[in-house]
Amino acid sequence: MKNTIGLSKRVIGEYSLKTMSHYHYCATLLRKFYIHTQTFLSSTLLYVSAVYNMHMIVPIFYLEKNLCIYQPYEIRGVLNNAAVGAAIGSFSAFVLGLIAYDYTKKRERWNEHNKAVVRYEGLLNRHLNAITGNIFLLKGSIETFKKSAFSENVLAPLDNYDYTIDLLNLQLLNVYQDYESLLEKVNHDMAGWNRSNERLFNVALSGRVPLEDIEINRKELSKRSTEIIHHLEDLMEETYTTLAYIRKFISIDRRDRFGRLEPTRSIKLTDKEIGTERKALIRESNATMEKDKKRTNKYASYDQ
């Protein structure tokens, strides 16, 4: 840069750096500071002068023969024209637009993930109720079969909506897919039980099958009912574990203020954290069931 003002160099201070060794150290630090800061300040002032069409004086400090020298430089018309200013302004707007677009998309992606996790929490809560209801129906059917009668109960399949594509956390995805594999097996078993029970009833009504054969099929279906009850009980335990994982995950997962997705992807829960949350969930579930029993008994007393 050219010194257009023509001011002579003015000595701010003169210090002897030969008498004490720490002065040499201070001079070295000052030189490094000068190298890093002068480039940044000069570039910033040039940019500001170009964008805002400004005329300014840049103070420059440097070392020369152990002296701290001050010399002003004038910035005038370096990038001082409308075309360059417009180009720099447009480029700045473009960069800021990209940053805003990236932030918006990451925020939308996190919202999709969060909605999927919350939906899975509600889905598993409904699974607990449906599992309990199906176990109740199967036990009632077994008692009916013991009386050589036919059951008209129909087991309700458990909903299995697929929100996995929206999940960001790999560990959460693996946990639900493990649960989903058992869920599909139990749904398949219950669908088979419904078909067998319906066919047994229709065959008995037709009168074309001997009663002895019908009784044998009834006993086999009763045995199958007991097996499905055990499968449903296993599924209930897995539902508690998976639901506890999701609840704990929701309590930790928070949207990053800068839109980053890495904090959500990096969440990993320990077995201890899941176990603690599972115990709390079971306590809440038992308290809810006790409340339902009291309400049922209350309504039953009204009928009497």
Image (cartoon, rainbow, N blue to C red):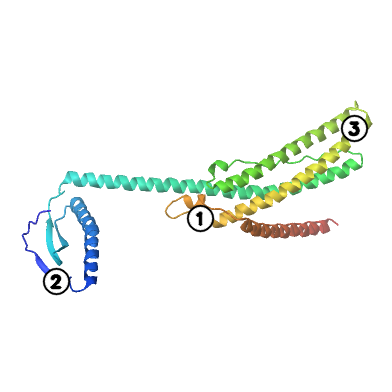
Q: Which residue is mark 3?
A: 214
Q: Position of residue 64 (x, y in %)?
A: 13, 63
Q: Amino acid at mark 2?
A: Gly
Label 2: which secondary element = strand
**Residue 166: in sight, yes or no?**
yes
Q: Which mark is residue 280?
A: none
Q: Position of residue 184 (x, y in %)?
A: 69, 39
Q: Which mark is residue 254?
A: 1
| Disc 2: which residue | 13
Labels 1 & 2 near each other (Cβ < 8 A): no
**Left or right: where does residue 293 sit relative to residue 89?**
right
**Mark 3 Cα-neighbour bin, 10 Å: few <14, some 14–19, many ≥20:** some
- Rendered residue at 62%/50% (across/down): 121
Mark 3 residue element: helix
**Could you say where residue 60 lies in the image, as x and y percent from the top left?**
16, 61
Q: Nearer the N terminus, badge 1 or badge 3?
A: 3
> 206 or 186: which is nearer to us?
186
